[in-house]
Image (cartoon, grey):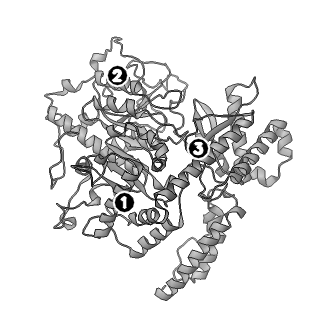
């Protein structure tokens, strides 16, 4: 394809995208396909000779579109919004056209400098303290665009881990780094995103998941008690992840309480994950949710969720960039340059070296919409969510299950007065399965207070009240059909096509929380035991993990657990008796049962042990602060 053909084909692609956006209502929201559908209609090998572009375009409708879930559809109410406003699409187009790889200032100066400026623009717009801004007076902070919120959480956990080990190494210089690593504990609420657990797994640290209050919010006293218990048992708290706008129900952790608690412990990094809610802070009426952010060491949000900006674009700010870069810096000669002492090189701020010119689309969006235009969009979604909430509350067969503050409504069918909770859960699961099978609207479930709940998310950038009315009518119709008669009577009225869709892997995956979200049940499942399969060891106190033989057996239900990073790697396929449980109960108070809490290796008792292997650390070209 030469320049002239690209000029023609580019215009054709823009026309195709516009036609796609305008004809979305005529399509099913979700695809009617089974896993492996595409392989059946694709060649087994790549083409040896070039193929006409017209053939490629024809295959988009024939092969690609049948498997697309249409996130921009007016009937898409699953997950969270995925913005793709036209200025953002144009930004990605120009980024691809320029084709630079901005891993350092010298590799493409404008990539770095525009990103720095955009991060300051956004930080000021949502109301972050000046400590997070690169332009802040005497600030060591700054921002970076990551690929996703998962990336943000992972890199700041790595930074917190490095800072904690450095702190402990000063106190215990002869202790092996691996032993120090085994003492680190991170904290998050049970409503935190699953990416926190994944970050802990990849960082090889323990994660303690904490219960929430009746508003699904993590409270300061809960965190304080857990951290004090772990310190007493010889562990070292190093990271706390809080959430503003949780995935399940858009709840907000209590930052004003959590912040002072975290700061009472040495070298604890406090992170705020505002992936969904962060963009809403553009509106003054929502900024009160930021109370307590001054205690945070890092903060992230996703403009692709409530700011119409196309994925991938996740914004991360830190108050101390040196703590971040010192954990990630690798500086080979071929990447060094004469300005590296004077400028930011974003290759030190994230896992990948290569970086796209992502700040372009953010710049395009901010200039095309302005803050006022983006505020209008946020307010529209909040207003429509409140309108949908009123529709749900008018129907006495349903209940609203969350406090609706932004663009998410959680609801469920109540069932009959004598129906037990499992029956009501099954009723709601059937309702969601039937709705998703229809292809008219698409929603996903969650569990709140151990109840099966349906999430209704405002996702379409062009949503209207009419769309809310239509969606609610569809939900009511399916609810009425479900409640009218027996399952057999309903089945006979269904077409074979709809029945096939109900049984399809796709519909079951998004309607059954065990398939959709495997981490939705935090407690380990009950197991049957015999002499070949002894019960897993559970600690009745947060004691040492280095000697399972010192643990006290307990069958009390777990309220919080620690993810043991090595557990998933050393579990055998046949459930061997030597297997180590990957999640351990840490809720019961410390009691001495002969095995004794005193057996737990405290950090103080480690002093004087000889380091078994030297700790390799990259040479750093600039000195990083020694304390957090």
Relative to 138, is 281 on the left or the right?
right
Residue 549's x, y, as percent?
34, 22
**With respect to residue 518, does 101 lie above or below?**
below
SS label for mark 1: helix
Which residue is found at the position 58% from the left and 33% from the top?
448
Residue 457's x, y, as percent?
60, 47
Q: CA distance from mark 2 to mark 3?
A: 47 Å
Q: Quadrant of the C terminus?
A: top left
Discs 1, 2 touching: Cβ within 8 Å: no
Residue behind mark 2? 549
SS label for mark 2: helix
Q: Residues within 10 Å of mark 3 (few under 14, many from 20)?
A: many
Which of pointers 2 and 3 indicates the residue nearer the eye?
Answer: 3
Residue behind mark 3? 408
Relative to 234, is 620 on the left or the right?
left
SS label for mark 3: strand
Give 567 or 106, whichever is nearer the viewer. Answer: 106
- Label 2 or label 3, whichever comes before in sequence order: 3
Q: CA distance from mark 1 to mark 2?
A: 54 Å
Give 241 or 354, whichever is nearer the viewer. Answer: 241
Q: CA distance from mark 3 to mark 1?
A: 28 Å
Label at residue 118: 1
Relative to 49, is 298 on the left or the right?
left
Which of pointers 1 and 2 indicates the residue nearer the eye?
Answer: 1
- Label 3 or label 1, whichever comes before in sequence order: 1
Whether residue 141 is visible here, answered yes or no, is: yes
């Amino acid at each position: 394809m030469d320049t002239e053909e690209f000029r023609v084909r580019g215009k054709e692609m823009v026309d195709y995208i516009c036609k796609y956006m305008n004809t979305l209502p005529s399509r099913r929201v979700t695809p009617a396909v089974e896993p492996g559908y595409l392989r059946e209609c694709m060649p087994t090998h790549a083409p040896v000779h070039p193929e006409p572009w017209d053939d490629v375009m024809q295959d988009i409708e024939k092969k690609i579109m049948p498997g697309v879930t249409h996130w921009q559809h007016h009937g898409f109410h699953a997950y969270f919004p995925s913005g793709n406003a036209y200025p953002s699409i144009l930004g990605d187009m120009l980024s691809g056209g320029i084709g630079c790889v901005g891993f350092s200032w010298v590799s493409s100066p404008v990539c770095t400098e525009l990103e720095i400026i955009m991060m300051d623009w956004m930080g000021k717009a949502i109301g972050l303290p000046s400590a997070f801004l690169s332009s802040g007076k005497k600030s060591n902070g700054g921002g970076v665009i990551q690929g996703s919120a998962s990336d943000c959480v992972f890199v700041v956990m790595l930074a917190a881990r490095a800072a904690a080990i450095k702190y402990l190494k000063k106190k215990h210089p002869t202790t092996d780094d691996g032993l120090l690593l085994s003492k680190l504990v991170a904290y998050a609420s049970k409503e935190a995103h699953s990416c926190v657990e994944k970050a802990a797994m990849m960082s090889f640290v323990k994660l303690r998941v904490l219960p929430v209050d009746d508003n699904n919010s993590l409270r300061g006293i809960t965190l304080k008690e857990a951290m004090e218990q772990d310190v007493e048992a010889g562990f070292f708290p190093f990271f706390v992840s809080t959430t503003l706008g949780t995935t399940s129900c858009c709840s907000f952790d209590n930052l004003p309480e959590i912040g002072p608690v975290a700061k009472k412990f040495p070298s604890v990094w406090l992170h705020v994950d505002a992936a969904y809610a962060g963009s809403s802070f553009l509106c003054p009426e929502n900024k009160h949710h930021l109370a307590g952010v001054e205690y945070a060491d890092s903060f992230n949000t996703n403009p692709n969720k409530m700011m119409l900006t196309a994925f991938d674009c996740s914004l991360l700010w830190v108050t101390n960039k040196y703590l971040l870069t010192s954990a990630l810096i690798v500086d080979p000669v071929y990447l060094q340059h004469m300005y590296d002492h004077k400028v930011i090189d974003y290759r030190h701020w994230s896992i990948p070296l290569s970086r796209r010119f992502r700040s372009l689309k953010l710049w395009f969006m901010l200039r095309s919409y302005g803050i006022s235009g983006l505020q209008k969009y946020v307010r529209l979604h909040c207003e429509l969510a409140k309108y949908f909430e009123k529709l749900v509350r008018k129907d006495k067969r349903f209940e609203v299950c969350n406090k609706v503050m932004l663009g998410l409504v959680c609801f469920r069918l109540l069932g009959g007065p004598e129906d037990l909770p499992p029956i009501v859960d099954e009723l709601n699961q059937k309702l969601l399965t039937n709705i998703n099978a229809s292809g008219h609207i698409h929603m996903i479930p969650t569990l709140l207070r151990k109840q099966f709940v349906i999430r209704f998310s405002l996702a379409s950038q062009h949503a209207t009240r009419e769309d809310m009315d239509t969606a609610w009518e569809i939900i009511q119709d399916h609810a009425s059909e479900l409640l009218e008669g027996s399952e057999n009577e309903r089945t006979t009225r269904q077409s074979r096509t709809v029945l096939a869709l109900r049984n399809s892997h796709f519909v079951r995956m998004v309607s059954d929380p065990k398939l959709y979200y495997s981490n939705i049940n935090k407690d380990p499942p009950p197991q049957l035991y015999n002499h070949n399969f002894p019960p897993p060891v559970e600690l009745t106190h947060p004691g040492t993990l280095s000697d399972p033989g010192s643990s006290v057996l307990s069958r009390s239900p777990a309220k919080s657990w620690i993810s043991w990073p090595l557990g998933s790697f050393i579990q055998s396929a046949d459930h061997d008796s030597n297997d180590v449980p990957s999640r351990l109960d840490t809720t019961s108070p410390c009691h001495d049962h002969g095995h004794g809490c005193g057996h737990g290796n405290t950090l103080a008792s480690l002093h004087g042990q000889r380091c078994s292997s030297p700790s390799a650390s990259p040479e750093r070209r600039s000195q990083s602060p020694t304390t957090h």
